[in-house]
Image (cartoon, rainbow, N blue to C red):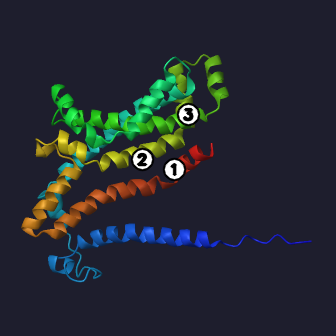
Amino acid sequence: MARNRPPRPSVLAGLSHIALAVWALLIILPLLWTFLASFKSNTEIFGDPLQLPGALRLDSWGRAWDKAHVGQYMLNTVIVVFFGTAGTMLFGSMAAYVLARYQFIGNKLIYYYFVAGLAFPVFLALGPLFFVVKQLGLLDSHVGLILVYIAYSLPFTVFFLAAFFRTLPETVAEAAMIDGASHTRTFFQIMVPMARPGLISITIFNVLGQWNQYLLPLVLLAGDPNKWVLTQGIAKISTLAGYEADWPGLFAALSMTILPVMVVYIIFQRQIQSGLSSGALK
């Protein structure tokens, strides 16, 4: 009687692990170098790239926070991303739930209309978008940028959550309706908690996408520097660094921009993976 032998690792599996290791190094090493460069002097930065900082210099972080106004840019970014993500998740989850669970005339048409937004590049609409926001009187305002963030984040949110809501059991919603729960109560108190893994995953994706957005703020917030977000501020700092030779300050500003996103991803890493795997398996 033949014994069951464990499967041998294939050559393809070994190559895939090597490719993943190389990819991880290509991502981690530049981030680590940027963080270490924020504590170096100009001489150390342009010297040996693998050299560790000679001393723990925190003055570059202070210059980036105060002189380069990274603190103001970060506050503006947090406000815009918070309300942009909150609006996206509220409207996107409600639209996805209705499109996934209710049948009515035009259901598929509306759904495909949202999906079509995934194939529409942002830069193609910058001109018309500028004039629309200007006519609404929302140019150079955080409100206008938040509304545009919501509009451009809805297609992917609806596409992702509609597929997730379709996998939820119908019997639970029917039981709630029999008990007298309204459609609104059924959605917020029953269906939303059941869809929590998918909601967390898409929320993190929206936060990362809106945090790193550059084109939209560049067009819609070009006037008042006090309302700029981090991506605009970093672009300005990178230009000034060449004139003032303050490269440690530039890398400190970059580190301040990267660290919040890394912390958010590390904290919610398991929730993101569970949400994506749940949607794929279902």
Q: Which residue is mark 1?
A: 271
Q: Position of residue 113 (x, y in %)?
A: 42, 29
Picture quarter with the N terminus = bottom right
Q: Residues within 10 Å of mark 2 (few under 14, many from 20)?
A: some
Q: Residue at x 12, y 46 (%)?
A: 225
Q: Nearer the viewer, mark 3 or mark 2?
A: 3
Q: Secondary structure at mark 3?
A: helix
Q: What is the number of the mark on residue 165?
A: 3
Q: List the single residue furthest toward the left.
A: 243
Task: Compare marks 2 and 1 and give the one earlier in the sequence.
Answer: 2
CA gap, disc 2 to disc 1?
10 Å
User: Nearest the camera: 129 or 254?
Assistant: 129
- Can residue 94 be seen here? The reply is no
Task: Compare marks 1 and 3 and give the one earlier in the sequence.
Answer: 3
Q: Position of residue 263 (x, y in %)?
A: 38, 57
In the shown orientation, is residue 71 left or right of residue 96? Answer: left
Amino acid tagged 3: Phe
Q: Are marks 3 and 2 in contact (CB under 8 Å)?
A: no
Q: Are marks 2 and 1 in contact (CB under 8 Å)?
A: yes
Q: Which residue is mark 2?
A: 204
Amino acid tagged 2: Ile
Q: Residue at x 37, y 58 (%)?
A: 262
Q: Position of residue 44 (x, y in %)?
A: 20, 80
> How many numbered marks are there?
3
